[in-house]
Amino acid sequence: MKVLKITLSTILIIAMVVTLALCCQHTLSAQKGGSIAPACRITNQSKQFVIETFGHYETVLDLLQAIENYAAENFQYDHKYQMPLIQDFDFDSFIEAKTGVCWEFAAFAECCVVLWSQEKDIPLRSYIVDMRPKSNFSATHSYNYVIEGNTIYAFDLTPVTGKRPAWGIHPFTGDSLDDIYAYASRMGENIYRVN
């Protein structure tokens, strides 16, 4: 009987290969529209909040501007945030805490857009993207894209300094995830996950 000798470095290499394979599989499924977003806990109170706060807006651009203004006036960036990063998002807790990090701002926007579009019966596709700047591959950031017909809106609620988001809302022509990937690449970003 042969004894298989496995070293710690062999185990680490195997773990890295498995992790890389899973990441590639997730990215490919995201590009095909099959990605699953992090769990978002929505209650009837959450739905009521969105309808009361944003229900009177009639266009997607007006909605996104209203969400951006609401976030700027009511939320702050949580500079004391500790890992783990992506986890379940509790809409009501975020509203109550009034503080968060980029993925929470993105999840808040996603929930508002989806609940609004359901209420208005307006067909939209809404995505949270996680990216790394090409200039700093160790940094990560989450923000949103909304597709309405042939228009894609890129927007980021995360405040950089103070309360106002630095990025704003950027509409561009397109209607697919391929268009989003191309836009992000032109902006110097590598998208590694789409939810």
Image (cartoon, helix red, strand yellow):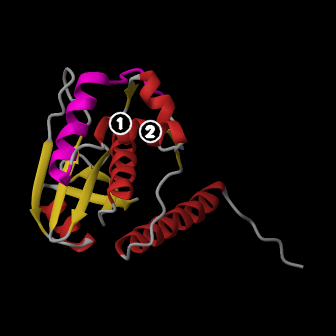
- Per the image, label 2 sits on a secondary structure element best described as helix
| Badge 1 vs badge 2, beta-carbon distance below 8 Å | yes
Viewport quadrant of the N terminus: bottom right
Viewport quadrant of the C terminus: bottom left
Label 1 and label 2: CA atoms lie apart by: 6 Å
Residue 34, position as x, y percentages in the image: 44, 72
- Residue drawn 20% across and 53% down? 60
Residue 167, position as x, y percentages in the image: 14, 40
Location of residue 112 (image quadrant): top left
Residue at the limit of the structure toward the right, as seen here: 1
- Residue drawn 25% across and 56% down? 145
The range drawn in magenta is 58-82
Quick one: 17 or 27, which is closer to the camera?
27
Residue 48: image tag: 2
Q: Which amino acid does label 2 sit on?
A: Gln
- Residue drawn 37% across and 77% down? 32
Instruction: Give the dominant element type of the magenta stretch: helix, strand or loop.
Output: helix
Q: Which residue corresponds to mark 1?
A: 52
Residue 163, position as x, y percentages in the image: 21, 23
